[in-house]
Image: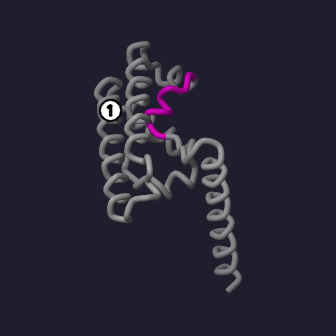
Amino acid sequence: MQTRMRVWSVSCVVVLACAAGVTHGQQRRGLSLPGVLSTSTVPSVAKQLELTDEQMVLAKKLLGEIREVRQELFAGLGDLSQEERQDRFAKYTAQRQEKEEQLGESVGAEKLTRLRQLSLRAGGQCHLLWHKPRRF
């Protein structure tokens, strides 16, 4: 019984911490969790992975493109039906994955895997609320 209470208490704390982090992110500049593209543009990550200047330029270009797509798809989101919102989220996810694959072609599979790990690490447990788990 005590074990169940502890598990339940810890679960509540984690959910509340994630909710507070997400709410804080929305107040600052909209919901923004680290992704592979944004993680790849961090100088310390680029140095650790030994990304070339060309790869960094590509990562920044792809990140800019996906930000534009996000702004277009999520403009007026509150005025849409639930189905339309889900459709837009699906389109955004597909385009984000496409951009990540383009980066992966440039940096290689091993570095892309490491970028995904670092992205997950940077996003913490809240990252799991928004992204499907995948095998590395």
Q: Is residue 67 left or right of residue 24?
A: left
Q: Quadrant of residue 63?
A: top left
Q: Amino acid at mark 1?
A: Ala
Residue 103 image point, x, y percent: 34, 29
Q: Which residues are magenta?
A: 35-43
Q: SS at mark 1?
A: helix
Q: Residue at x 37, y 53 (%)?
A: 89
Q: Residue at x 65, y 48 (%)?
A: 27
Q: Is residue 62 left or right of residue 32?
A: left
Q: Quadrant of residue 108?
A: top left
Viewer-side residue, 38 vs 46: 38
Indicate whether 50 appears above or below 98.
above
Q: Quadrant of residue 66?
A: top left
Q: Main secondary structure of the magenta part?
A: helix
Quadrant where the N terminus is found in the figure: bottom right
Q: Residue at x 49, y 33 (%)?
A: 38
Quadrant where the C terminus is found in the figure: top left
Q: Is residue 131 left or right of residue 95?
A: right
Viewer-side residue, 15 vs 22: 22
Q: Is residue 100 magenta?
A: no
Viewer-side residue, 104 vs 85: 85
Residue beneath disc 1: 109
Indicate whether 65 appears above or below 5.
above
Q: Is residue 41 magenta?
A: yes
Indicate whether 92 appears above or below 84.
above
Residue 80 image point, x, y percent: 39, 59
